[in-house]
Amino acid sequence: RRRCCSSRTPRWARSSAASAVATHNASGDAHSTLFAGKAEVAKYNATLTTTYAEDSNGYQAQTVNVSGLLATDEPTIDCVLSGTDPDADTAVLEAFSLINRATTGAGTLTVQCIGDAPTVTIPITLLVVR
């Protein structure tokens, strides 16, 4: 019994498709190459102390060491609450609200406050997407 040719992909088309796929996969814009460059997420912890000094711009500022942090990082920063001491957590939240700006350096984080500086230590967490 003979089959109709239109129901099968001709041999020349199959080899052309296979060749096109192989060419694409070998190229620099292949999906596997692009996915290899996906974003990296890093999480760091630090503690801001009660020691602040006036910087050259008139802000109260503090710099802390954060090993692994890059000068090009733009972290999302949040305070860490105990979840067991409402009074202490309230104090940390109030202190954290005084911080208006943060900048990174190679292995450092500098925070600035307008006006009063925090008078309690603030545990913080930093999330970086690179």
Image: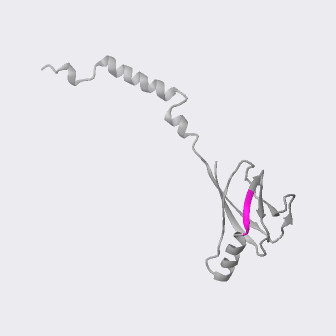
Instruction: Answer whether residue 85 is visible to the viewer in this image.
Output: no
Taking the image as shown, residue 34 lies to the left or right of residue 95, namely left
| Rendered residue at 42%/23% (across/down) | 20
Is 128 a magenta residue?
no
> Which picture quadrant has residue 45?
bottom right
Taking the image as shown, residue 103 lies to the left or right of residue 39, namely right
| Rendered residue at 45%/25% (across/down) | 22
As drawn, 38 above or below 108: above
Residue 67 spot, x, y in % from top left: 75, 56
Residue 72 spot, x, y in % from top left: 72, 47
As drawn, 88 above or below 19: below
**Residue bounds of the magenta highlight:** 98-102
Residue 63 spot, x, y in % from top left: 81, 60
As drawn, 111 above or below 69: below
Taking the image as shown, residue 52 lies to the left or right of residue 40, namely right
Pick whichever, 75 or 24, lies toward us: 75
Is 99 a magenta residue?
yes
> Which picture quadrant has residue 96?
bottom right
As drawn, 56 above or below 82: above
Instruction: Answer whether residue 9 is visible to the viewer in this image.
Output: yes
Give the residue at the far top of this rendering. Answer: 12
| Rendered residue at 73%/70% (across/down) | 122
Taking the image as shown, residue 32 lies to the left or right of residue 115, namely left
